[in-house]
Image: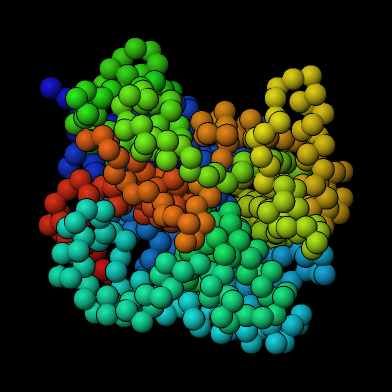
């Protein structure tokens, strides 16, 4: 007899969304998390009087009743909610030619662009007008209704025919890259670099590598729902998902490291833990990356050799350098929370150290730091190659952190004099604490060069969720992967019943 219906390996957002929904559907669910803190790449951690987000820092549609954010849809189904702080501008871009504010409000955003290039602002409007009808079409089909088996066709035809009709004129760009749309609408070099930057911040790839629906969704939600920060940081999201899981009798086991997915006669039958314990289940869901699932959790012989090779050859986005700082905040009353710094216009924005992202969430939520203090998280791309914990490791950390400090000095010139706590993380840190292959941010699957694999695997009863499954990288995407997986494991009628209980769908 199985010990439960479903085992979920990893408590990242994708894993918790799948687990919570399946518990809501009445399944017996156990989530096994290696770390002592849930949340995966979205976990928070405390050092003294400072609480830091480890990863995601930019959110929209967490609380708006009409939000399309799949995470919000899961929280609604689980009967959980978040407190949040809205803000606009959503951030500032510090480019070599100057600084400008980025507004959620489309008109205000374009007005800022007009100060730099009038013609570019007109072209940006054309670019947005080409993408936003795709968002309007997607808006009528909630992610919570979707699944990844043949029955999805019936669900769409029975319930969402008008929205499918709206989708028809947009079919040419559904599989197109943002670069294709940009090439057809934008000639201004500055605005093209701006679009490349926004795509990079969203997907880890520039415009020609990013799929158009991803940016259409971002532009639509950003202008419709605005941006916000959850009170309590990313930990508040994780806690809400865990509450929802446990409310419906799901279990979360922390410090519970899965050593192996057990496969018998081509079917997943459970897991073996590091301590030797075996947990049996009819379904296993891996929230680990595609590389970690297929190399660390399964034996080579468990998968068809050709499938395994193709999967492991999936290109990966580089890892990161992280700088977490606790600083004194006197005299910083007008500080804003999000900043992106590009050091050199002649270098590619994806070059390690050239584009630096900065989040100062204590601007919105003072509880994250002691009174008159702030928490700062700055990060930039950095490949794992060449990193070793040897005699030169500490020196290399300091050297690689210099680009982050230079970026921070664009925002807080005397930042070095304010530091009370400094934590420098490398790709090795990223790989170790998040148990991620090469410390990666996720797959680098360029638009037109392949699609993110879906939740299914060649092993019966084994499924995957997270940023290396469709629809990809980012909090809304990984939440959507959890929805798609959970819905695929139940009858469409059960999903329809959930949707009927939510009035706004």
Taking depth in this image into account, of 96 and 226 the one nearest to the observer is 96
Query: Is residue 136 in view from this perspective?
Result: no
From the top left corner, tell me how far across and down residue 476 is, in percent: 43, 56
- Compared with residue 38, is residue 159 higher up or lower down, i.e. above or below? below
Residue 296 shown left or right of residue 207 in the figure: left
Q: Quadrant of the C terminus?
A: bottom left
Residue drawn at x 54%, y 65% is 227
Residue 144 shown left or right of residue 330 in the figure: left
Taking depth in this image into account, of 340 and 370 the one nearest to the observer is 340
| Residue furthest front in the image | 306
Instruction: Answer with the quarter of the image where residue 394 lies.
Output: top right
Q: Quadrant of the N terminus?
A: top left
Residue drawn at x 63%, y 31% is 429
From the top left corner, tell me how far across and down residue 392 is, in percent: 80, 24
Residue 96 shown left or right of residue 325 in the figure: right
- Compared with residue 171, is residue 384 higher up or lower down, i.e. above or below? above
Residue drawn at x 49%, y 81% is 130
Query: Is residue 56 in view from this perspective?
Result: yes
């Amino acid at each position: 007899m199985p010990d439960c219906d479903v085992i979920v390996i990893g408590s990242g957002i994708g894993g918790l969304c799948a687990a919570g929904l399946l518990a809501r559907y009445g399944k017996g669910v156990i989530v096994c998390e290696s770390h002592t803190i849930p949340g995966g790449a979205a976990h928070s951690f405390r050092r003294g009087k400072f609480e830091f987000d480890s990863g995601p820092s930019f959110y929209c549609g967490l609380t708006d009743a009409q939000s399309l954010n799949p995470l919000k849809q899961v929280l609604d189904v689980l009967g959980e909610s978040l407190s949040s702080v809205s803000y606009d501008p959503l951030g500032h871009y510090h480019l070599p030619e100057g600084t400008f504010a980025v507004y959620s409000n489309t008109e205000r955003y374009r007005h800022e662009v007009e100060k730099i290039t009038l013609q570019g602002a007109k072209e940006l409007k054309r670019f947005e007008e080409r993408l936003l009808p795709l968002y309007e079409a997607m808006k009528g089909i909630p992610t919570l209704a979707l699944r990844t088996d043949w029955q999805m066709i019936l669900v769409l035809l029975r319930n969402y025919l008008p929205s499918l009709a709206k989708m028809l004129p947009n079919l040419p760009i559904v599989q197109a890259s943002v670069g294709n749309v940009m090439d057809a609408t934008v000639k201004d070099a500055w605005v093209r670099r701006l679009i490349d930057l926004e795509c990079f911040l969203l997907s880890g790839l520039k415009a020609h590598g990013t799929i158009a629906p991803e940016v259409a969704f971002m532009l639509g939600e950003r202008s419709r729902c605005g941006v916000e920060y959850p009170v309590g940081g990313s930990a508040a999201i994780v806690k809400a998902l865990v509450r929802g899981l446990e409310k419906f009798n799901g279990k979360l086991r922390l410090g519970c490291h899965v050593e192996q997915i057990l496969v018998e006669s081509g079917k997943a039958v459970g897991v073996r833990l590091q301590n030797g314990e075996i947990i049996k289940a009819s379904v296993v869901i891996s929230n680990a990356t595609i590389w970690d699932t297929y190399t660390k959790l399964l034996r080579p012989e468990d998968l068809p050799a050709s499938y395994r090779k193709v999967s492991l050859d999936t290109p990966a986005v580089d890892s990161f350098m992280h700088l977490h700082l606790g600083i004194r905040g006197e005299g910083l009353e007008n500080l804003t929370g999000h900043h992106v710094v590009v050091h050199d216009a002649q270098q590619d924005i994806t070059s390690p150290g050239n584009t630096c992202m900065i989040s100062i969430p204590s601007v919105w939520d003072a509880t994250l730091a002691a009174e008159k203090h702030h928490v700062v998280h700055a990060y930039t791309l950095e490949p794992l190659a060449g990193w070793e914990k040897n005699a030169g490791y500490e020196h290399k950390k300091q050297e690689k952190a210099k680009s982050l400090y230079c970026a921070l000095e664009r925002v807080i010139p005397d930042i070095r004099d304010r530091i009370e706590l400094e934590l420098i993380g490398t790709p090795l840190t990223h790989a170790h604490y998040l148990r991620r292959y090469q410390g990666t941010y996720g797959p680098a699957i360029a638009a037109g060069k392949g699609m993110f694999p879906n939740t299914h695997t060649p092993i019966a009863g084994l499924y995957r969720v997270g940023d290396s499954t469709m629809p990809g990288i980012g909090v809304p995407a990984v939440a959507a992967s959890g929805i798609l997986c959970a819905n695929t494991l139940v009858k469409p009628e059960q999903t329809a019943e959930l949707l009927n209980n939510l009035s706004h769908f």
